[in-house]
Amino acid sequence: MTPPSLERRLRQMRSRILVRSWGYRQRAHARGVWFRLRRVLTDASEAFAIPAEAARRLVAEGHVAERVGEDLQPPKLIVRVPAARLAMVDGARPVAVRLSADLFDAEALALVPFDLGAEAPRGSPASA
Amino acid sequence: MGSEVPNLLEAGAAATLVVSQDLDVGVPVDRHANLKTRLGDLHEFESSADEPSVWTPRSPALLELNFVGIDPAQDPAEAYVLEDDRLPLLVFGALSLVTAGASIEVEGMQVPLPRPAGLLLEKLVTDRTGEKGERDLLVALGLLRLAGPGDLDEVEGAYRRLRTELRHVVRSNLTILSLLGPREGMPDPRSGREDVAALLRRLEAREPDLP
């Protein structure tokens, strides 16, 4: 007979796999926004809260706006910016690179990417 | 098979990478009978009444032993119970990704350790939730820090053999690992973020149409 403790752990594991499979099917939909946001943050060596107007200027200059920002409610401009350019942005405030209230409170975010060589093939930038 | 592995793989088994709470012992299912004949040698441990695959130490100076089953033929997303009166085992499919690696000598006995690549992938392909999940991901980071170019080639090769959903789980766990904050009694994971980003980018490199 299977010991109850092992039976319980097996049941819990199978439940987690069912939830995981649901999450996988949701990856391109609402539930998937968490993965997509984490994915964008993973490439960032640093993150800064910046004024929305400054973020719009950066996008107008040609810096990449991450599409996942449009998927958040309310939408948030998330811009990939080299450190040298970010240094010239007034009012930039460093925030920890993690899912935190501080990060979600920011009007807009500037992410300084790691220098990993060629651009990642993932996702696609927003149309902004 | 668990958190002690990166510590033991460090030069001189320096044990600076992870703080372990227990010791997982991987048991290939075809060696289960052999192991049972040796259980009587575990004088310093006794089988837990609640959890018979766990053996608790008689001394607080020792770690708890957690026996887990390995079935190389198993699907990585499945699990089953190997029933036995004396030592039943939960057999985790993700452990089928683990292969035997170098041995270290402990008090005259050869102790085989898993190859880092397979164990790293096992940590990343398994659901990780809550505090234990985060600790397991820190073990993955410890292994990543020890991994050489050959190990990373192995990780990539094994990753490409996984089905699409499991590859997504691996990438998802890497993003969770990348955003972990420091935890008391564990090395700060933030210094490893660039290695995590590099591995993730490498795994994605030949994957079109990722969300």
Image (cartoon, grey):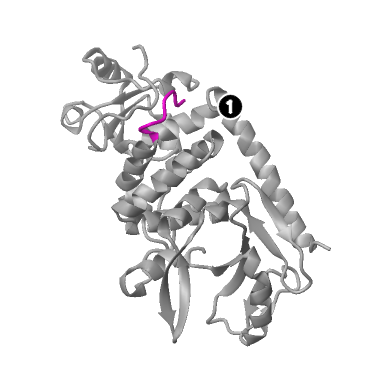
Whether residue A122 is visible here, answered yes or no, is yes
Identify the element where label 1 is drawn: loop
In the rendered view, does B211 fall on the left or right side of A89?
right
Dot 1 alpha-carbon crowd within 10 angstroms: few under 14, some 14 to 19, many 20 or more: few
Kindly report the secondary structure that dominates the magenta region of the rendered protein.
loop
Question: Camera-side residue: A37 or A55?
Answer: A37
Q: Is residue B209 magenta?
A: yes
Q: Quadrant of residue A117?
A: top left
Which chain does the residue under circle 1 lie in?
A
Q: Is residue A119 above or below residue B149?
A: above
Identity of the residue drawn at 63% across and 86% down: B41
Identified by mark 1, the residue type is: Gln
Q: Quadrant of residue B58?
A: bottom right
x, y percent for residue B210: 45, 26
Q: Is residue B193 above or below residue B188?
A: above
Question: Camera-side residue: B47 or B134?
Answer: B47
Q: Is residue A14 magenta?
A: no
Question: Camera-side residue: A92 or B171?
Answer: B171
Name the residue tied to disc 1. A26
Q: Which residues are magenta?
A: B204-211
